[in-house]
C-alpha cells in the first residue's frame, strides 16, 4: 500500500462579490487541486452564501466548506477580519486538527508553499513579495532567517515599524490545535484566538500572531533560511471589469455597456 500519513491543510479564503471573483477562486482552486490530500478549503462569504460561489466550489474537485459571515457591514472596518474569525470559530468548534493558512483569493501561490507548510509544528512564517501600489517596484515583507530560526524582519513602511511582527496575512501558518487545546501549548489563557477589528490598519497580523507565540523562538522558518518567495500579493484588482455572464449584481454598474 502507498498510503502516507499527512497533516490536514486548512486553507481559509475570505471572498466577496466583485467582477473578478470567479477568476480568482478558479485560479486558486487550480493550485489547491494539485496539493496532496488531505486538504480542506474553508471559503467564507459575507451575509449570504451566493449560488454563484457555491457552483464554483462544487466544480473544483477540492474538499470545501462554504461558510457565511453575518455582520452588518456598516459596523465593521475590515471585512476580511470577521470572515477569517468565522473560519476560526468553525475550526475551534469542530476541533479540526491540521495546519491553518489564510489564503486570500487574489494572491498568487506556488504549489511548493502548500507542500512545505505541512512540516510546521507550532507556527511557521516566510517572506511574501508584493507589488507596490504604484506598480513601480516589488517589496519583500517577512522574516530574516538563520537556518530554521527567525532572527529579524524585512519591513519597508515607516508607519508599520512599531509592529511586533512584520508579517503579511499570507506569510504565516499555524497548528490548529492552538485554537482549541490551550493546555497542550501551555497558553497562559484559554481566551479564544481571534483577529481584531479595533486596531490600526496594518496591525491585524501582528496582534493576531501575538496571541499564538510569545516571540521568534517559537517560530519556524519556511523553508529553512527563508530563501524562497512562494507567494505574491500583486494589488491588481480591476475596478472597471465586467461581471461574468449569469452572475447577479448587488448594485448597479456605474457605466452602461452597449451590446452593439
Image (cartoon, rainbow, N blue to C red):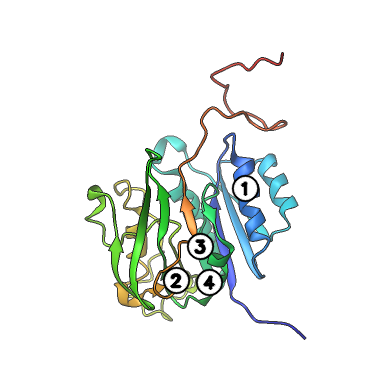
Pinpoint residue 179: horizontal percent, then vertical percent: 46, 69
| Side of 251 where 165 appears, left or right | left
Task: Identify residue for label 4.
Answer: 116
Camera-side residue: 149 or 96?
A: 149
Looking at the picture, how far across and down is residue 241, in whole percent? 58, 29
Upstream in sequence: badge 4 or badge 3: 3
* Label 3 Cα neighbours within 10 Å, binned few <14 / some 14-19 / many ≥20: many
User: For numbered disc 3, what is the local secondary structure?
Assistant: strand
Read off the residue under disc 1: 25
> Can you say whether 245 is above or below 24 in the image?
above
Tell me the quadrant of the picture where the N terminus can be found. bottom right
N-terminal label among 4 and 2: 4
- Report, in whole angstroms, how far the alpha carbon at label 4 lies from the one at label 3: 12 Å
Question: Is residue 92 among the parts visible in the rendering?
Answer: no
Sequence-wise first label, 1 or 4:
1
Determine whether the residue tagged by mark 2 lies in a helix, strand or loop: loop
Q: Earlier in the sequence, mark 1 or mark 2?
A: 1
- Which of the numbered marks, if any, corresponds to residue 101? 3
CA gap between label 2 and label 3 equals 13 Å
Give SS at disc 4. helix
Q: Secondary structure at mark 1?
A: helix
Residue at left offset 51%, top offset 30% = 239
Can you identify the residue that label 2 sits on?
Answer: 222
Amino acid at each position: 500500500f502507498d498510503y502516507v500519513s499527512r497533516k490536514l491543510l486548512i486553507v481559509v479564503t475570505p471572498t466577496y462579490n466583485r467582477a473578478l471573483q470567479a477568476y480568482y477562486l478558479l485560479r486558486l482552486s487550480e493550485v489547491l487541486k494539485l496539493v496532496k490530500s488531505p486538504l480542506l478549503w474553508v471559503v467564507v462569504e459575507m451575509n449570504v452564501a451566493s449560488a454563484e460561489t457555491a457552483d464554483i466550489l462544487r466544480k473544483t474537485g477540492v474538499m470545501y466548506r462554504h461558510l457565511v459571515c453575518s455582520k452588518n457591514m456598516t459596523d465593521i472596518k475590515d471585512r476580511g477580519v470577521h470572515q477569517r474569525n468565522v473560519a476560526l470559530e468553525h475550526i475551534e468548534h469542530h476541533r479540526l486538527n491540521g495546519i491553518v493558512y489564510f489564503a486570500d483569493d487574489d494572491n498568487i501561490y506556488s504549489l511548493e508553499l502548500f507542500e512545505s507548510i505541512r512540516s510546521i509544528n507550532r507556527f511557521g512564517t516566510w517572506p511574501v513579495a508584493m507589488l507596490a501600489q504604484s506598480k513601480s517596484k516589488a517589496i519583500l515583507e517577512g522574516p530574516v532567517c538563520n537556518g530554521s530560526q527567525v532572527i529579524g524582519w524585512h519591513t519597508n513602511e515607516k508607519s508599520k515599524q512599531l509592529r511586533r511582527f512584520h508579517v503579511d496575512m499570507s506569510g504565516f501558518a499555524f497548528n490548529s490545535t492552538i485554537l482549541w487545546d490551550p493546555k497542550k501549548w501551555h497558553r497562559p489563557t484559554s481566551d479564544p484566538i481571534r483577529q481584531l477589528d479595533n486596531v490600526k490598519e496594518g496591525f491585524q497580523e501582528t496582534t493576531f500572531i501575538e496571541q499564538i507565540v510569545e516571540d521568534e523562538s517559537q517560530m519556524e522558518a519556511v523553508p529553512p533560511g527563508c530563501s524562497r518567495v512562494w507567494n505574491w500579493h500583486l494589488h491588481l484588482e480591476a475596478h472597471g471589469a465586467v461581471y461574468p455572464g449569469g452572475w447577479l449584481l448587488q448594485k448597479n454598474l456605474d457605466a452602461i455597456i452597449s451590446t452593439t
